[in-house]
Image (cartoon, rainbow, N blue to C red):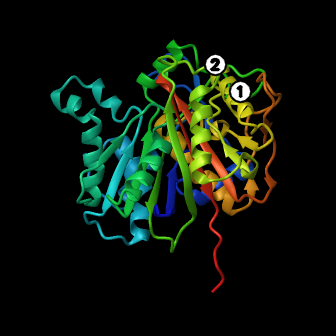
């Protein structure tokens, strides 16, 4: 019998707030982190993005470390992990692992043409720097698989615990808005000239964002916030950057995850989707969901609040979805106006109360990777 796996601690650092509570409050108010930025060090012309203030990062970090050697990304990863490590009170032994999940890591280090900077751009160095800050005793594990990285890390953690390698796994996922990332998406002509509008008729592409999110995946049910009951990751190897037109990889990932969770499609109460607002991604998701008969399940994309936070997105959106389930509240899909995909889907247009027992988190990324994880709300027994 496979072990039951839970998420017991969550946190996130975003432009909307430096803890989960302030993020949920901002979402309920309808605030978005996406603003117009004029920063020629990042892009020659003004652009919309969701960026965390350096001042806030530095003042928050200074509260518990005077160390100056950490990069900006390392600081926001440490800030996301610190409270959950403190709350968890778990011994760092051979059964406690650490996963760092990112798409681009410290890519900004490459700006300086030195061997140190080149070294710091390696993902294993980033993971070691964060792990050493806290004193993990096991070797850090890096999950870097394009934009599914954040949610894929949850899937990897679940399986590692079920194979009895570990009992507890701390995950941090993060990416920052850099010149490299902006120029890349711009070269794809995939960036929106206005805040992004997932699933909308007049959507024109992504707004980029940055965030870190952290969770503790555990066998311990005591402080459980949610139970992870099914997962799957499928690569349909469709194209270096374009999603499959039939949604094959996403279709199969969701199908497998539901099969492992042993629930029928009609049991799902909510889908936290990827919804990047590019013409191809949103269309592909709508096709995959319709192929599975999930077109009536309430769905949102949180990209209208956070922009596309790359490797952080899947974990950040999971953290918010857990709050959604535990508060029995569906959050609006910000930026959505008129349906703009060829198949009908049930996009959440305003915050509303709903009974959420089971939800699905999906993500899709470059190279044809797709990940789906099914979660179940904990039924807390009355003692």
Which residue is more in the foreground, 164 or 144?
164
Q: Where is mark 2, residue-wise?
A: 245
Residue 252 in sight from this viewpoint: yes
Q: Residue at x 39, y 64 (%)?
A: 85
> Mark 1: few, some, or many residues within 10 Å (few <14, many ≥20)?
many
Label 2's element? loop
Residue position marked by numbered label 1 in the rendering: 287
Q: CA distance from mark 1 to mark 2?
A: 8 Å
Query: Toward the viewer: 345 or 55?
Result: 345
Give coordinates of residue 280: x percent, y percent.
Answer: 64, 20
Where's residue 202, x and y in %? 76, 20
Tell me if mark 2 has few (under 14), some (14-19) or many (20+) residues whose alpha carbon lies within 10 angstroms of its own. Answer: some
- Disc on res. 241: none
Q: Is residue 210 above or below residue 159?
A: above
Q: Measured from the top left, where is residue 104 in percent x and y?
A: 39, 31
- Compared across the picture, whether 235 is left or right of 94 comes to right
Corner quadrant of residue 204: top right
When the figure is inspected, residue 117 is found, relative to residue 300, above or below; the finding is: above
| CB atoms of marks 1 and 2 within 8 Å | yes
- Residue 247 position (above or below residue 157): above
Q: Residue shown at 66%/83% (left/top)? A: 382
Point 37% across, 64% down: residue = 167
């Amino acid at each position: 019998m496979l072990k039951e796996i839970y998420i017991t601690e969550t946190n996130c650092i975003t432009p909307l707030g430096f803890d989960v509570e302030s993020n949920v409050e901002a979402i309920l108010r309808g605030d978005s982190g996406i603003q117009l930025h004029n920063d020629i060090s990042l892009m020659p012309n003004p652009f919309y993005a969701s960026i965390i203030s350096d001042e806030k990062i530095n003042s928050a970090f200074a509260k518990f470390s005077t160390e100056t050697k950490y990069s900006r990304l390392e600081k926001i990863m440490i800030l996301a992990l610190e409270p959950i490590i403190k709350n968890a009170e778990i011994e760092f032994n051979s059964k406690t692992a650490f996963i760092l999940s990112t798409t681009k890591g410290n890519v900004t280090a490459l700006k300086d043409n030195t061997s140190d900077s080149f070294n710091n751009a390696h993902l294993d160095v980033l993971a070691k720097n964060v792990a050493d800050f806290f004193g993990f005793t096991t070797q850090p594990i890096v999950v870097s698989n394009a934009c599914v990285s954040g949610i894929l890390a949850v899937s990897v953690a679940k399986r590692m615990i079920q194979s009895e390698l570990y009992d507890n796994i701390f995950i941090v996922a993060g990416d920052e808005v850099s010149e490299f990332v902006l120029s890349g998406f711009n070269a794809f002509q995939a960036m929106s000239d206005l805040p992004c509008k997932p699933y909308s008729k007049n959507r024109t592409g992504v707004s980029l964002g940055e965030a870190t999110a952290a969770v503790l995946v555990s066998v311990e049910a005591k402080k459980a916030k949610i139970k992870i009951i099914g997962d799957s990751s499928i690569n349909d190897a469709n194209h270096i950057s374009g999603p499959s037109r039939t949604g094959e990889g996403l279709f199969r990932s969701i199908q497998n995850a539901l099969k492992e969770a042993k629930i029928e499609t009609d049991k799902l109460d909510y889908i936290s989707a990827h919804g990047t607002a590019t013409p191809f991604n949103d269309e592909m998701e709508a096709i995959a969901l319709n192929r599975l008969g999930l077109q009536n399940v309430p769905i949102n994309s949180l990209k209208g609040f956070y922009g596309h936070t790359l490797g952080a997105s899947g974990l950040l959106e999971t953290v918010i979805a857990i709050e959604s389930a535990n508060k029995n509240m569906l959050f609006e899909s910000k930026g959505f106006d008129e349906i703009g995909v060829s198949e009908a889907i049930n996009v959440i247009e305003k915050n509303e109360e709903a009974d959420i027992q089971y939800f699905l988190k999906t993500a899709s990324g470059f190279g044809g990777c797709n990940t789906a994880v099914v979660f179940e709300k904990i039924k807390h027994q009355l003692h």
